[in-house]
Each structure stands twice: as structure tokens, then as C-alpha cells.
Amino acid sequence: MLAKQTQSRTLNWLGRQLFNRNDPAAFFDPLLEPINPMWVQEYTPARVEQIIQETPDTKTLVLQPSRRWSGFRAGQHVNICIDVGGIRRNRSFSLSSSPILWQEQGRATLTIKRLPGGRVTNWIHDDLQTGTVIGMGEAFGDFQIPEPARPVLFIAGGSGITPVLSQLETMAATNYRAPVTLLYFVRIEDDVIAREKLQALAARYGALTLHIITTHETDTPRYLCDADLGSIPGINARQVYLCGPKGLMDLARELLHQRGIADTDIHSTFFSVPQADPGNEPLGGQVRFSESKLGVGSEGDATLLEIAEAAGLSPRYGCRMGICHQCSCRKTAGTVINRLTGQASGHGEENVQLCISVPKGPVSIDI
């Protein structure tokens, strides 16, 4: 065992020195990529087969990953890597197709909304062309359909419909035998993503009840209210899935709690990092990146990932939201606050996620 570990460390060191890569299988990627980008090993290459305009600010990418990709389960995320201005960027998106599309046709879809000022989403909308090969990671996330089947309520807002589309298509294809209701909130009619697909699902899948609710078509905004929940048959027996803007998810959770629905029956996924209240104690401190022999001072609620990047380091990361764990590394000393939970770590050695860990005093990290 020791000999294998030593060999692996040696290969990784050699890869970093010769090819600037940690994965020995990717050593020859710089030679292979110009010949055929689908041969690279550092990530799973995926060819953009089709680009579909869903709404004025939302597009669906139909991707064909190489066959070594492991596939996914309905409701999961995937990291993609693309070159924007000569710099490789990583972002996480929900898969919007059913896993059956991958199983039968070797394809998967991502439905991506343009974010104002977003470096990656704007490049995807303005510059990405069919035939381009992008990188894909393995799927992750536990926002998944209940097994065995139980009644379900989906509450989605805007682009939060994307993982729900994957789940609904899977439920319909597998004849999921329990009532399913979707409350889908959008600002105006033109913002409805995959309208035809949703209507077709509701027409052929008898267990599905579909409600599309516009919030800003009139002078008085129309938001989720208790009457919406009261119209759902047997709501207290349902598993509830939330995906969308933080305001909608917070409101939904509050209304569900008022009806006696426990957190154990509420499942959520998100596109930006929610921040727990860390209390009144000051955050920040001196961060020591031991492998890089670099010390950096920080103030406020900047995460270890943000601090490392500001110092010119390039640690591995994926979702930047605390979901995928790709940025996990070893903390050797000091205390960090988890931005998701507000909880403090121990003072000694442990693994932490850089993207959601905020230093509280001096911290040492193995980077």
C-alpha cells in the first residue's frame, strides 16, 4: 500500500512539473486536444449538438458527452468547464433532461439562463456555437425523486424549473405512481421555460397537476400564498421540493412550517450560496497557505476560496456553493465558519470546503 501511495505521489509530482496536471491520464492532453478534443482525459469532453432558445434569456444546450461519462440521476447538477477569453472557467448547472435520454441516445441537456454581468452565462449565450466541445464533470447532488414513490409538491421559480424538468420527465417515463403537483412561478408569460414540454407532460402524465403562475403581469405582484398550498390535496403527506430564487424558497419554507410540514419533508437546491447569520463576532484573519508558503490577511466574510484566488492561487473548485465538495482540502490549524450553517469548525486538523468556509482568526490550509 505504501509503495502504491509513493508511486502515485511521484506520478502526480511529475505531471505537475512536466504538464501542469495532477492526473497522470491527462499528461498527453495538450497533444490530443488539437487532434480530437473528445480524446482528452482531464475531464469528460461533451460536444454541443444543438442550442435551443427557450426564452429571450434562457437557452438549452443539447450535449453529447463521451461514453466514459457515468451519467446522472434526475435532479442532479454537473460542473462544466469552458474557455472564456483564454481562461478556463468552471460553473455548475442542473441537468434538465431525463437520465433516459442519456441511456437511450447518449445525450443530456443543460438549460441555462443569462445572468446580468455573468462572465460564463453571457459567453454561453453570445459566443457558444454548435460543434464546440466543453468539459463535464461527474454528476452530483441529492435533490432526487423519493423512493419508494410518495406524493410530491414541486415549488419552482424562474430557472429553478431546470432540475424539476428532469424529475418530471423521469416520473412520467417510469409511471411514478403517486400524485405530483407543480407550482411554477415566473415574472411574465414570456419567462416560462419549456412551456410546450410542461404542457405535453401534463397532458400525457395523469398524475401531474400543473400550475404556471405569473407574478408581475398586473400592477399588484402575485406571490406564493397560503391559499396556493391550501389547494394542494393532502399537502401534509407530500414531499416538497423547492428550487428557485432565495425569496421564493424562504417564503415557501415559512408557509410550509406554518402548516406543520417538517424540514425532513422539505428538500431544496439553490443557485447561489445562502448565508447563515454568523453572529456578532468579527470574521477574517491571517490565512497561511502552507504548500504555497504564502500568508494573506483577510477581513469580513470572504471565503477561503476567494482569499486564495485574490492571492493569485488557483485551488480546485466546482459549484462554489458547498454542494460538490471539489474544493475540499485540509485545514491544519485555526477555526472557520461554515457560511451555509453558521457553525464553527474545530481548532485542529480537518477537511473543509474552501467555497463556504470563512476564517475566524488565524487559519492554516494545505494549499
Image (cartoon, rainbow, N blue to C red):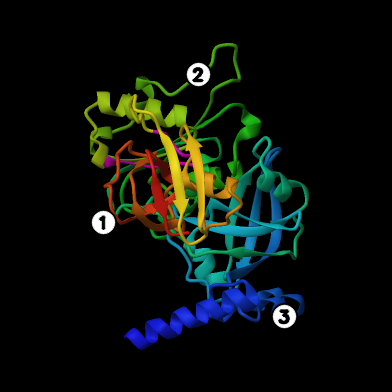
- Residue beneath disc 2: 222
The magenta stretch spans residue 266:
yes
Q: Label 2 crowding class (10 Å Cα cut-off): few <14, some 14-19, many 20+?
A: some
Residue 19 location in percent, x, y? 64, 76
Image check: 363 left or right of 37?
A: left
Range shown magenta: 265-275
Image check: 363 left or right of 302?
A: left
Kind of element beneath mark 2: loop
- Residue beneath disc 1: 148
Q: Label 3 crowding class (10 Å Cα cut-off): few <14, some 14-19, many 20+?
A: few
Kind of element beneath mark 3: helix
Q: Is residue 261 visible?
A: yes
* Mark 3–mark 1 CB contact (< 8 Å): no
Quarter of the view holding residue 340 = top left
Q: From the viewer's side, name the closer residue of 222 and 134.
A: 134
Kind of element beneath mark 1: loop
The residues tagged by marks 1 and 2 sit, at their Cα atoms, a distance apart of 35 Å
Residue 286 location in percent, x, y? 45, 42
The residues tagged by marks 3 and 2 sit, at their Cα atoms, a distance apart of 56 Å
- Disc 1 marks a residue whose amino acid type is Pro
Quarter of the view holding residue 362 = top left
Residue 70 location in percent, x, y? 47, 71
Residue 64 vs 56, above or below: the answer is below
Q: From the viewer's side, name the closer residue of 208 and 229.
A: 229
Rendered residue at 24%/32% (across/down) = 261
* Mark 3–mark 2 CB contact (< 8 Å): no
Q: Please state, as top left, top right, bottom left or bottom right, where the N terminus lies in the image.
A: bottom left
- Residue beneath disc 3: 31
Residue 224 vs 61, above or below: the answer is above
* Mark 1–mark 2 CB contact (< 8 Å): no
Q: Which residue ends up furthest to the bottom in the rendered image?
A: 3
